[in-house]
Structures are given as structure tokens and as C-alpha cells.
Image (tube, rainbow, N blue to C red):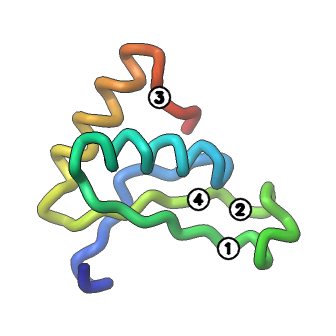
Amino acid sequence: MKPAELVAVSTFRSTADAQIAKGILDVAGIDSIIRSDNAGGMYPALAGAELLVNADDLMSATEALQAATEAGRGPST
């Protein structure tokens, strides 16, 4: 993926929640990465974490996360 093609599908309170969402997208076959500035892990609650996907996958990723949330398997946003 090229950085110019990445868009945030969601922002989470913690990296852990973003990792749960990334796992949901992995199962759905959607590539994603987590972007977070937490001072190298020293301050995990410093800032939220964004889950980035290819712009072409934004709709599919949104639907996958929404379905997981509705089924009670989604992370907190």
C-alpha cells in the first residue's frame, strides 16, 4: 500500500481496541495498519489510535466493523 492511498476507517481510544478492529479486518481479508503516537509505548493512553485502510477498501472495512459491532464482537471507539 502506498501512504497516499491510506484513509482512516476509525479512531479508537486505545491501541488495544485498534488491534481488535484490525483482527476483524484481517479475517475479512482487508489489509490495514494502525497509526498511533504513544511515545514509543511509554504512554499508551496519550492519544488514540487510527486504523488505516486502502481508500478502495473503505466501504468494505466500514461494513465489516459495523457488522462486528452489531454482533457484539467489535471494539470500543
Mark 2 → mark 4, Cα distance in angstroms? 7 Å
Q: Image quadrant of residue 44?
A: bottom right
Within 10 angstroms of label 2, few (less than 14), some, or many (20 or more) residues?
some
Label of residue 37 in the image: 1
- Give the residue at x 30% y 41%: 27
Residue type at tag 3: Gly
Q: Image quadrant of residue 37?
A: bottom right
Mark 3 → mark 1, Cα distance in angstroms? 22 Å
- Give the residue at x 35% y 53%: 9
Quarter of the figure with the C terminus:
top right
Do residues under tags 2 and 4 come within 8 Å of each other at their CB atoms?
A: yes
Q: Position of residue 6 (x, y in %)?
A: 29, 72
Residue 25, relative to residue 7: is it above or below?
above
| Labels 3, 1: front one | 3
Residue furthest to the top? 71
Mark 2 → mark 1, Cα distance in angstroms? 6 Å
Residue type at tag 2: Ala
Secondary element at tag 1: loop
Q: Image quadrant of residue 54?
A: bottom left
Label of residue 70 in the image: none
Disc with the residue nearer the chain's start (2 vs 1):
1
| Labels 2, 3: front one | 3
Within 10 angstroms of label 4, few (less than 14), some, or many (20 or more) residues?
many
Do residues under tags 2 and 1 come within 8 Å of each other at their CB atoms?
A: yes
Label of residue 74 in the image: 3
Label of residue 49 in the image: 4
Q: Which residue is mark 2?
A: 47
- Give the residue at x 41% y 24%: 69
